[in-house]
Image (cartoon, helix red, strand yellow):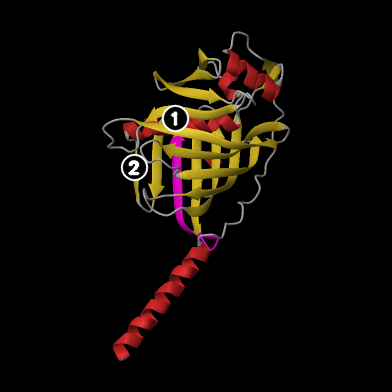
Amino acid sequence: MRLHRGLLTFAGVFMGVAALLAVGLRVRPAPFPAVTGNTVPPRTVPLPAGLPPPVERYFRVTYGERVPVVHSAVISGRAWLRPVPGGPTLPGRFRFIHEAGRNYRHYIEVTLFGWPVMRVHEVYLDGHSRMETPLGSNVDAPKVEQAANLALWAEAIWMPAVFLTDARVRWEAVTDDTARLVVPFGGDEERFTVRFDPQSGRPQTLEALRYKAADSPTKTRWLNDVLAWGDFGGTTLPRVASVTWADDGRPWATFTVEDVVNNVDVRSSLRGRGP
């Protein structure tokens, strides 16, 4: 009888803890503090001629006849993340700091009851990468640098003018609703296949072949899907986007962007810590 009661008590405690954790996993963290600092009004350049049709359509919808020159961006918001493959989806918040087309720093917090339980620091500076997480870290691994470079360019979707104003970038025609985006990687190049929504003219998916880890024997299809768009200072940019490894079959991250600040001085924050 005592054993039976003990098992019932244990089961009750276990179920209570599980229910409490379930509640904690639904609590979204507060946003990071707003970005401060002076922003520089962008100069503009004419929309280039000779773009593939879906690319020209998208940039005309976004900017019109003149394109701003964007030097930096700080992208902030909240997310749902699976830091462990096959594990649960957890709430979090993020800040991505970019020197456009050159360098970035990612700061991500995974939270429980709104409080950070895991922090991720990732930098890609001058072609060198460093990632620090509670699950491990790596520095200057060639395959990780290839992955980091693709992240640099995929996240330029929040400052898409860079795809036109950076002389190292070019577009190649594929179909009426698809184009190839060619970006630099050291002395080489990488390629995204960009699929555009035929109705809105905006990108739906940026797809590339990316190494998953420092010891990956081959590259894996890597999908960046735009799920919703919103207005950011008069420019329509992705509001919600997911990132999926094709062999996983479901997103490992879904980012909801709440703030995009362009042309602020990021030189010190690129080498900082925290948000």
Q: What residue is disc 2 on?
A: 138
Q: Residue at x 59, y 17 (%)?
A: 54
The tag on residue 150 is 1
Magenta stretch contains residue 219: no
Q: Is residue 94 visible?
A: yes
The tag on residue 219 is none
Q: Residue at x 50, y 46 (%)?
A: 107
Residue 182, position in %: x, y? 47, 19
Tell me where the magenta segment starts and ends, as one range. 112-124
CB contact under 8 Å: marks 1 and 2: no
* Residue found at the far top of this picture: 50
Q: Residue at x 39, y 83 (%)?
A: 9
Quarter the N terminus occupies:
bottom left
Local SS, label 1? helix
Label 1 packing within 10 angstroms: few (<14), some (14-19), many (20+):
many
Q: How many numbered circles does the render carry? A: 2
CA distance for labels 1 and 2: 17 Å
User: Magenta residues: mostly which secondary structure?
Assistant: strand
Is residue 250 found left or right of 160 in the rendered image? left
Residue 164, position in %: x, y? 59, 18
Local SS, label 2? strand
Residue 32, position in %: x, y? 60, 51
Residue 257, position in %: x, y? 60, 42
Residue type at the position of mark 1: Leu
Q: Quadrant of residue 100?
A: top right
> Disc 1 or 2, which lies upstream in sequence?
2
Is residue 238 found left or right of 143 in the rendered image? right
Q: Quadrant of residue 147?
A: top left
Magenta stretch contains residue 123: yes
Residue type at the position of mark 2: Asn
